[in-house]
Image (cartoon, rainbow, N blue to C red):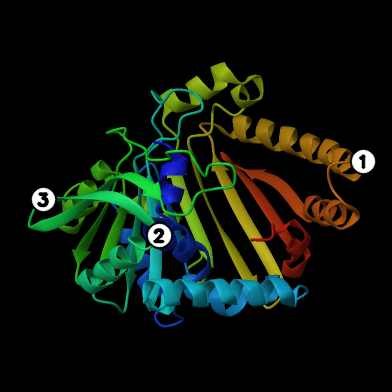
Amino acid sequence: MNRKFYFSFLTFALALAATVALVIGSSAGRAASTNSALSALPASDFVIAVDVGRALSETLPSLLSSNPALLSKLNAHLEEFQQKTGINPRVFESVAIGGSLNPKTPPGRHDSNVVVIARGSFKSDELLDAGFTAAKKECEFVKEEQQYEGRTIFLISNVRSLKKEPGQENADVTRRSSNDKFAVAAVDANTIAVGSPESVRAAIDASLGRNRVDDELVRLASQSPNAVASFSGRIPAGFSEKQASDNPVAHYFASIRAFYGSFNTIGSEAESLLTLRTETAQEASDISQALNSLKSLAAIGFTQSSQADDAQRKAIADFIKGLTVTSQGNEVQLNMKFQLPSLAPLVHHF
């Protein structure tokens, strides 16, 4: 599915999916509500849970503490979002993302079977109405209604922005491909789902107890219940083999069958954990050795890179220095500790 299509529907679907997932929320009911959204996902190959309350109240202020101008700009964007949509972003309390890894997907094409589940202290129908009303001020689009299991799914297509990009003043940017559709639906009174039509229908099925996300993926993604973000996934054998055939480096990691991890902060200190699960202990040991070798080479490469300024080179060097790679049994553990404000030089201005 064309990524530009999603971005053209700026004030609604992406505002809910991208902005909410990364930077907004409420601090109430953190762990419980995040796990609740995670458990509401349909069957997936990978899942991501985000504590958006902590992201707003702790992580972002600490990350941008050395750049108050950028923090002020972020807050201004959130206020602008509320003014344009009439939606207070802090009504969103939990976000979960699930998707599939399809080995048949052609190289360079993004799989569209990704769904975002957002829960919060809002009335789903009212929030959707407000979102569509705001979207009409930004773009023209076709909205179709589809009934499924007693829910209304809104299918959005043929989006054309009312604000032309520089150099496109005389261009028709409407996309008429029938494949360029995404869907949004109220799953229940305080839960919405955004994604492809297939994935939103799957989310509704999951809400009815059918074909829900695997309990083991939820358990692995809940290893650090107070994390800002956590994730887990399984890699289908066919997917690994296909990637390995396309990339000689990826071939080395074709034995990885699962992964899980988290990102957490305490004050200005941050820690990122990633575990790779292989088929055998020997494969885990081999990958650990390879990653440690790559770590040494990367440290040299980044310090000599002409693509980054001094602050960026220092930040990357600190990250590499703070990374430890070990193996235990058939698992490889990557642990990175760093000062959160050190990320600031790598944050792109928005």
Q: What residue is shown with label 2?
A: 138
Q: What residue is shown with label 3?
A: 148
Question: Separation of disc 1 and disc 2 at Cα?
Answer: 44 Å
Q: Quadrant of the C terminus?
A: bottom right
What numbered label is drawn on residue 304?
A: 1
What residue lies at 68% left-to-right and 67% top-to-bottom? 270
Q: Position of residue 326 (x, y in %)?
A: 70, 46
- Looking at the rendered image, the disc whose residue lies closer to the viewer, 3 or 2, is 2
What residue lies at 74% left-to-right and 64% top-to-bottom? 344
Q: Quadrant of the N terminus?
A: top left
- The secondary element bearing badge 1 is classed as loop
Q: Position of residue 327 (x, y in %)?
A: 65, 43
Crowding near pointer 3: few (<14 within 10 Å), some, many (20+)?
A: few
Question: Separation of disc 1 and disc 3 at Cα?
Answer: 56 Å
Which residue type does callout 1 highlight? Gln
- The secondary element bearing badge 3 is classed as strand
| Residue at the extreme bottom of the image, as rendered | 28
